[in-house]
Image: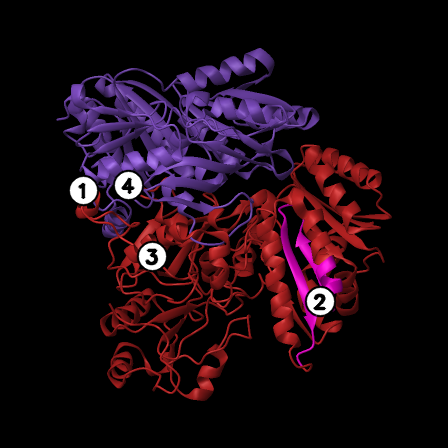
Amino acid sequence: MTDVTPAPAGAPAGLPGSFHAALAQALPADAVLRHPADLLTYESDALVHLRQTPGAVVLPRTTAEVAAVVRLCHAHRIPFVARGHGTGLSGGALPRPDGLLISLARMTRIRHVDIDNQYVVVEPGVTNLDITKCVAPFGCYYAPDPSSQSVCSIGGNVAENSGGAHCLKYGFTVHHVLGVEAVLPDGDVIRLGGPTLDPPGLDLLGVIVGSEGTLAVVTEVTVRILRRPQAVLTLLAGFPSIDAAGEAVSAIIACGIVPAAVEMMDRLTIDAAEAAVHPNFPPSQAVLIVELDGAQIEVHELFATVEAVCGRCGAETVEIARDNTARERIWKGRKAAFAAMGRVSPNYYVQDGVVPRTRLPEVLRRIRDLERRSGLRIGNVFHAGDGNLHPLICYDEAIPGQAAHAEQVASEILQYCLDAGGSLTGEHGVGADKKGSMPKMFTADDLDTMQRLRCAFDPSAICNPGKVFPTPRLCGEVPGPYRAHPVERAGLAERF
Amino acid sequence: MTDVATVQRLEPADARELAEMLRSADDRRLAVVVRGHGTKAGWGVPAVRTDAVLSTARLQEPIEHCAGDLTVTAPAGATLAAVNAVLARDGQWLPLDPWAGGESTVGGLIATNDSGPRRHRAGAPRDLLIGVEFALVDGTTARAGGRVVKNVAGYDLGRLLCGSFGSLAVITSATFKLSPLPPASRTVAIAVPDGAALGRLIAAFAAAVLTPSAVEVALPGPRLLVRFETTETAAVQQAAHAETLAAAAGAHARVLHGADESACWHGHDAAVHHPGGVLLRLNVLPTDVAGVLAALEQRASLHGLRLHAAGRALLGCLLVHADGESAALVELIRHLRTAARPPAGHVAVLSAPAAVTHAVPVWEDLGGAAAIMRAVKAQFDPRGTLCPGGGPGGLA
């Protein structure tokens, strides 16, 4: 068993010279970064308060180069972390000083496009939005749309099982990835799935998606693309309270309608968005964005119901986007919400938690109480259709202790989500950020069982170690719970 | 071979007892095969040894429907029909229509990842499962996922169990996301003159702006069944649009609803359910569907095989039933495997007489992923207690 726990303070960190020499042999000189100034960029992903300098960074251009690097790591027992474009919000790509960071940013080729069979094969560094751009001329698009879609990589989406505003109807990355080519932690290259469905054997593709880079390094992704719906209708409604807006969402779902998206923003986030991108939102306590898509006739019929429901639930204003410009303006207001918080607060902490949709009012009440108690403003912007909350906790790092206070508030909100039967994370992932909270959601047996999968893929624990799980499982152990010794079973001895 | 008379029957009443029985069997090195309602018990490769059959029939905790959240949690032993009866009270359903329909159990649905025509829009069990509870052979009970539709905390072991044929763990309960029951339905039944017209029609439906819930192709025929499940007005209008697409391809179409529509789908589902013969699952690219079916028909008539096929035209998933001389059936499977090679396609033998399975492999080749799949099996079931040799791809 190799010890991959972080080196104790004061101990020399970094990578052994023999490993550096082997890297230099395996890759072209411009694909290896070692100088401290070059490593700075890679110290964190978008969760910037978690930082470490990697031992070195490699920028492979091909699957063969990735495999060569991983084989070296395996031979030298060097931990490695794969990174896409660094937009992750859970520290999943947080490097380690004693490890190698593998950036897939140079693998940006679109390898194959098949419009008739509705799939595209891409390298992991291709951005989410570039997939849509390349098939848009054919009336197609790639459905998952995380807010960072113009900059995030498809490889990162696969690692995090990214969602987006439209996953209520269209699902997550896992529903749209048909196959991957992946480098296993020993350097072997495998293919799982492909353009035809029901690949043979176990569904390892289904678990690699969302494994946060802890099982393999994905070097190629086959994604399903969809035809653009015939009609898309978007509505922006202002409500006198969050509760009234929440009631409207329940009523829409009770009518048997599954909208393509239902987003909610509260007053604080509306103000922030207005200050930043001027989407012309109404000055209400809460706004709801509801989008329906599909066949023209169906969308128009159901949209009338949605409009009526909003009215019945006390909407103060209802704006219907009649064209693409109006629709894009509304979505710009929503998608800019996170970044816009910078306009109303020097710093903010983005939380990601999930509650069963019907428990939203209760959890939001608890968040409002917490806001009063903590003295920190909390903005709420969320995917109301699926109960995915993104509370934004405002703080000022110039005030001593406030950053830590904000973190505590964020973690208390997570507890509310779990109390309501929800989840620690709906789309940002566990990463380094929430691994300590995993035992609040799962039993030791649950986590241990998950780690059996990890042991099958990565028995040497070198593939993004220290993420997702609070404590690593030693893969050499005999799996399973305590078993009585035969002597105990025979009643000859007891264990205390 | 297993002596049937000595096979134990285990019928645990709950998850705890099930885990205990598994642990005890594992300790005694007994080979355990898990069974729901047995609707697909003959699929794949039988276990090389069966000392005990573990039935989920008594796992019947109440079905918990959270209508406002569009989720349901059901025990492994509940049938799909029982689950959907509960959901229907609030106008919702689990939109799966697997082989043997409502008689399939929740556990069996997941273990086989089986689906039917509605997979076109609704997906397979793997796409709808959001949480799962299960027991391991060492007596551990564990959970993955949760009860909310959006959740990325921890490994999604539920997906790993989908299609694992009871080879890794025993599912005890599951949570699914649901859909509202559609208020209206229309089916356009299209008699297609020939294979070339079928290819054109499949392409036309792939490019159309319609939102069908199923697009099925069937042999003999060929026939296409295109179903619209939505509001009354939208179903009628879309069906009319589908009729014009059919007419443009020179095919004759009829719009069905009510009893005629139900009878049509009943007949379609029954078309590949025949005793004897071989049942194959073909996965090909959608653009190859028409060609593959035409080649199949030609081969069947040449070798005197009785042939039926039904499948998802725009997903390229086909079920083919063929009956005739064993040697001709073996040749048919070999031929299909040469024609539909990965990544453009693959062929699994779901059920077949011994004379056929002795001559051709039942499962597709696992390729380079075989070793990692074996490693996963070894982690979850180190002694090979669960369904030995009967896992997908013949995992031991």
Q: What's the chain of the residue with tag 2?
A: A
Residue A388 included in the magenta stretch of the image? yes
Distance of label 1 from label 3 (alpha carbons): 36 Å
Mark nearest the camera among 1 and 4 is 1
Q: How many numbered marks are there?
A: 4
Q: How is the image coloured?
A: by chain
Q: CA distance from mark 1 to mark 4?
A: 22 Å
Q: Earlier in the sequence, mark 1 or mark 3?
A: 3
Residue A14 visible in image: yes
Which numbered disc flags the more N-terminal residue, 2 or 3?
2
Q: Give the colour in which the image draws chain A.
A: red
Q: Which residue is identified by label 1?
A: A490
Tag 2: amino acid: Ser
**Residue linked to disc 3:** A454
* Numbered circle sitting on residue B393: none
Q: Secondary structure at mark 2?
A: helix
- From the image, tell me which residue sits under label 2: A374
Residue at 52% across, 55% down: A162
Residue depth check, mark 2 versus mark 4: number of the one nearer the observer: 2
Pick the front one: B84 or A35: B84
Q: Amino acid at mark 4?
A: Val
Task: Please provide the residue range marked out in magenta.
Answer: A369-397
Measured as percent of width and height from the top left, residue A345 is found at 73, 73
Q: Can you identify the residue that label 4 sits on? A: B137
Q: Residues within 10 Å of mark 4 (few under 14, many from 20)?
A: many
Same subunit under labels 1 and 4?
no
Asked whether residue A350 is in view, the answer is no
State the quadrant of the C terminus of chain B.
Answer: top left
Where residue A428 appears, as percent x and y from the top left, is 54, 60
